[in-house]
């Protein structure tokens, strides 16, 4: 397995299609035909949530890499052989290193601090939302969530333009 960050950030969201990058499970990352929409690191300890987010993002052409907790996510982000993600989604409650630790570590690293973060969590009380705002989280999505709403928020963070609404 490659180690380190999503790597040096290129100027083109999504990078070249079929660049051969691998996620932590060894599956090839899928880009959209003709270029992809961007890269997303999905960090959640629940496999079904990661799968739901991955499926919906890949339908829109995003490359997706998964992590099961903040510690694994930071290992991925610090792997210099990987391109940096355009957006990170993070749950709050996870084993080893939780979402608050992860957000703090990202915002403290000058190389990572610019990456938009979407907190996707069941911890959605007013105090959680206020803490997320203080931590410089870009978007806050409460579980259960509408996958289209999440993809729309991510699309806006990546390109400034949300995807077209389903017909």
Image: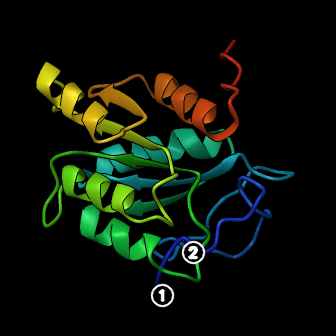
Counting other residues with Cα less than 10 Å from the Cα at mark 2, is it few (<14), some (14-19), or many (20 or more)? some
Q: On screen, 61 above or below 75?
A: above
Q: Are marks 1 and 2 in contact (CB under 8 Å)?
A: yes
In the image, 77 versus 66, the foreground residue is 77
Give coordinates of residue 49: x percent, y percent. 33, 44
Which element type, helix, strand or loop, lies under badge 1? loop
Q: Mark 1 points at which residue?
A: 1
Number of marks in the image? Answer: 2
Answer yes or no: is residue 62 visible: no
Q: Mark 2 points at which residue?
A: 22
Q: On screen, 13 above or below 68?
A: above
Q: Which mark is residue 93?
A: none
Rendered-image quadrant of the C terminus: top right
Which element type, helix, strand or loop, lies under badge 2? loop
First in sequence: mark 1 vs mark 2:
1
Q: On screen, 156 above or below 36?
A: above
């Amino acid at each position: 397995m490659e180690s380190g960050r999503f790597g040096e950030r290129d100027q083109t969201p999504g990078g070249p299609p079929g660049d051969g990058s691998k996620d932590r499970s060894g599956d090839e990352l899928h880009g959209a035909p003709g270029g992809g929409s961007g890269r997303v690191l999905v960090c959640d300890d629940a496999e079904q949530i990661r799968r739901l987010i991955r499926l919906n993002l890949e339908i829109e052409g995003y490359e997706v890499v998964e992590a099961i907790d903040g510690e694994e996510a930071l290992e991925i982000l610090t792997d210099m052989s990987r391109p940096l993600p355009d957006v990170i989604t993070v749950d709050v409650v996870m084993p080893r290193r939780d979402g608050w630790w992860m957000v703090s570590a990202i915002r403290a690293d000058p190389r990572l601090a610019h990456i938009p973060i979407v907190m996707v969590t069941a911890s959605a009380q007013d105090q959680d939302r206020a803490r997320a705002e203080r931590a410089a989280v870009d978007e806050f999505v409460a579980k259960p969530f509408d996958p289209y709403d999440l993809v729309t928020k991510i699309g806006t963070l990546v390109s400034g333009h949300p995807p077209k609404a389903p017909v």
